[in-house]
Amino acid sequence: MGTLLVATSFAAAVLASRPRSAVGKRLAQLAPRAQLPQRLGSVLINRELAESGLGWTAVELVRAKIVLGLVAAAAAAAIALIVPVGFFVVAAAGYAGFIAPTLRVERVAAFRRAEADDAVVALVEWAEALVASGRPIESAFVAIAERGVGGLLIDRAIAAAARSYTLGAPLFGALAREAAAARLSTLALLANDLERARDLGRGALVVLRDHRDRLRASERARSLDAAGRVEGRLMLVLVLCYLPALMLLVVIPLFLGLLDGLFA
């Protein structure tokens, strides 16, 4: 039974990982597409997949989950032929392989969001420096869009806004829409403030400096919060690592020596 499961899993993994032929691709284009239920589509096609920047589609993600689940279950079944580990270990290995691609996407998406928080600070700093030197605000953002600020989500949003601006759309209105679509709340707030700056009688440089000061204060508070947690982590390392070694190497031998001296 275990041999059959291993052979079936590996055969299914090979067939699932093979690319489709040209004839299969043409037939897939001609075939009617089935509509997924709304709830199932929301599970498969999520924003984290787009935010991760891995370039995977929802179908590729599901395929990777199935293939890795089968491979992990087959590996556990192969081990079960040598060591009796039980069915639950095989099922747990298959489940771990199935959820591994999702965990990978979530981790990369979280990294991209943290990267975007740092990149928006650089965006405001650069824009403020260019505008302070006499450059128009729209020209400054277009120049930054060509260079990039080092964050995938931020660079993608300002590049799309710059392309819309080249076609005649308002720059900051397009930037606000792109930021809202990418769930970049700080960038969307900046774009909305710059869009309303002329109507409110405020200069773009004043708006940029206000956001720069706010972001600097936020970064300072975040740094102080991270520094405040260092002491607790160091204490945890001291308790878990150094104190047991101190007990084994110093305190216990000393206590045993004293007991030996008392009963000698």
Image (spheres, rainbow, N blue to C red):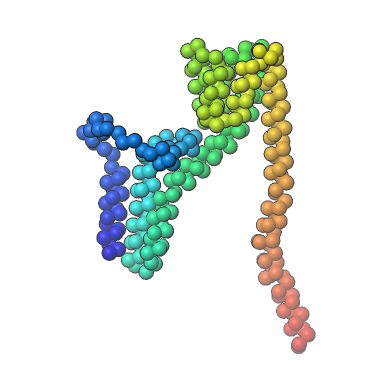
Between 67 and 46, the one lying in front of the other is 46
The image quadrant where one finds the N terminus is: bottom left
> Which of the 4 quarters of the picture holds residue 236?
bottom right
Q: Decide if residue 14 is on the left or right side of residue 141.
A: left
Q: What residue is at 75 percent from the left and 82 percent from the top?
A: 259
Q: In this view, which residue lies farthest toward the bottom?
A: 264
The image quadrant where one finds the C terminus is: bottom right
Q: What residue is at 36 percent from the left and 38 percent from the top?
A: 36
> Which of the 4 quarters of the picture holds residue 27?
top left
Q: Is residue 19 above or below residue 11?
A: above
Between 9 and 193, the one lying in front of the other is 193
Q: Is residue 239 above or below residue 60?
A: below
* Number of numbered tags placed on the structure image: 0
Q: Position of residue 62 (x, y in %)?
A: 38, 43
Q: What residue is at 54 percent from the left and 40 percent from the top?
A: 110
Q: In this view, which residue lies farthest toward the right?
A: 262
| Residue 147 seen from this side | no
Q: What residue is at 43 percent from the left and 54 percent from the top?
A: 96
Q: Position of residue 63 (x, y in %)?
A: 35, 44
| Residue 248 seen from this side | yes
Q: Position of residue 156 (x, y in %)?
A: 50, 26
Q: Decide if residue 38 is on the left or right side of residue 256.
A: left
Q: Position of residue 92 (x, y in %)?
A: 42, 58
